[in-house]
Amino acid sequence: MKKIAVIGAGTAGLASAIRLKALGYDVTIFEKNEKIGGRMYQIKEQGFTFDVGPTIVMMPSLYEEVFKISGVDPKDYIDMQRVDPMFEVFFRDQTKLTATNDLVQMTLDNEKISEEDAQGYMAYLADVYKRYLVAKKYFIDRTFRKPIDFYNPKMLYKALQLKTLSSAYRSISKFVKNEKLRQSLAFQTLYIGVSPYNGPSIYTIIPMIELLYGVWYIKGGMYSMAKAMERRFIEMGGKILLNQNVESFEIKHKEIQGIKVNGRHVDGFDAYLSNADFPWAMNNLIHDKKSKGKYTPKKINKMLYSSSSFLLYIGTDKKYKTNLHSIFFAQDFNGNIDDLFEGNIPKDPSFYVYSPSQVDDTMAPESKEVLYVLVPVPNLNDSGEVWTDEQIESYKQKVLDLLSTKEQFKDIKEHIEVLKMYTPNDFKTNFNLQFGATFGLRPTLLQSNYFRPQNKFKYLKNLYFAGSSNHPGAGVPIVLNSAKLAVSEIDKDLK
């Protein structure tokens, strides 16, 4: 039986490990932290449970597939429920838009804005759905191992069909004219850390996916998915070694011969799948210059990175009238986005609030609330600085002040029982994310598809990657797909 080492028990690492076990491989995961999950983990404090990273479940079939391919019923591992309304968007003039996956209600709501916008919204859905089908078949669900896989007439024609040269905001603006409706669709590119004003228009598929496939919630929070994958992997005979820091790959003749783990040599594996963030892995796990190929430290530092996040995890001694997902826009949304991607910490930010205790009483003590408040901020490279304790405290107060200006949270400061924070520094330190970029490499045109680091690393015979900085990109559903592609490449080579 051939043996595979998986470096990192994040989302892609766990999903890859299950897929490899299902194919009959002997799989061992090495995880540097004391808990599995990577960014998909939780903090527990005084009866409150906080999801640390991802919070929005889209494309549930990709979550379920991880369990189905291993021969079990997903319902025995994760309890998913559809959420409607999906989220609410609040503007500074006290108006709001409600996003529902009830198409009838959505049409009625859009008609209140204007019949032209209701018609344009339908046209947007039809247009982006066609592009999504092309993207899925020809780009998301396949790898680009050789130049000819991308540079051929058929693929170039399909790439043109994606209409990626326009930005997400401009693409949406062709269909809907109301500025608030435009913003409520365009902001979702921030789910993967890219600007709606500069990010490729293909990312307008995100709101379409929400509407057509729904937004879901997993009981117990997102960490329940990570724990379920851990459980299934162990049931299948897999091994997870915690507190095992992989320090380097030991390379000879363009092949990994072993790994250095907590100062000791470990070998005996036929292939190595890294769930460590690709830029960090290039700079830290591969010491041999030739084995890095084009991914030298200079190249890695010059690549473009996604935004980062400033997070407050708040436990309150009372309930609040809010939704599972709420988005609050800045007065000047355009200026806020400019600040974010020009390296300026936003003075008047847009922010997102997630309150799982609205739908799940296991997340907070009775009559209490969990609030996860996320403010997109620049990564450490774009901002040019590490956050100091003084800056962190100051920004915490700024965010609490801003939160308390919202009618539903006006007394928030008087009712905080627990408050934890996460900054770009933490994303860099805890998850080995280059520059603390929450979503890894930014998915620009020249850092997507063939141009993104691939699942099979071409400079070493037996190294593979799965994760948000690799093909096809960031976001939990796409990362689950990255795991699928990486495993397919391994199986192709080892059979």
Image (spheres, helix red, strand yellow):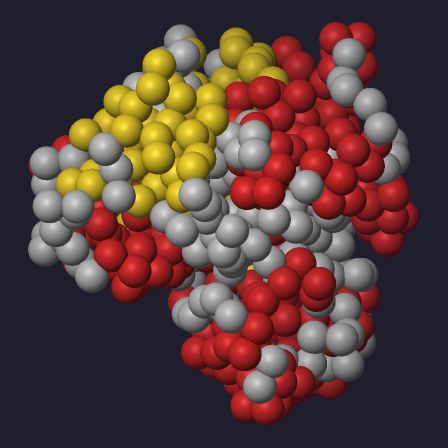
Kindly indicate the quadrant of the structure image that contains residue 447. Answer: bottom right
Q: Residue at x 61, y 32 (%)?
A: 283
Quarter of the image for residue 395 reads: top right
The structure residue drawn at horizontal position 16% and vertical position 55%, both measured from the top left corner, is 23
| Residue 444 image offset from top left, x and y in percent | 70, 60
Q: Which image quarter is the C terminus in?
A: bottom left
Does residue 366 appear anywhere in the picture? no
Residue drawn at x 62%, y 26% is 428
In the image, 206 versus 461, the foreground residue is 461
Left or right position of 315 against 47: right
| Residue 222: percent from left, percent from top | 38, 38
Note whether 480 is above or below 158 in the view shown. Answer: above
Q: Is residue 126 above or below residue 386?
A: below
In the image, 133 versus 451, the foreground residue is: 451
How many numbered dots are placed on residues in this image? Answer: 0
Which residue is found at the position 37% from the left and 48% from the top?
Answer: 462
219 left or right of 202 in image: left
User: Residue 359's spot in the image, x, y percent?
Assistant: 37, 39
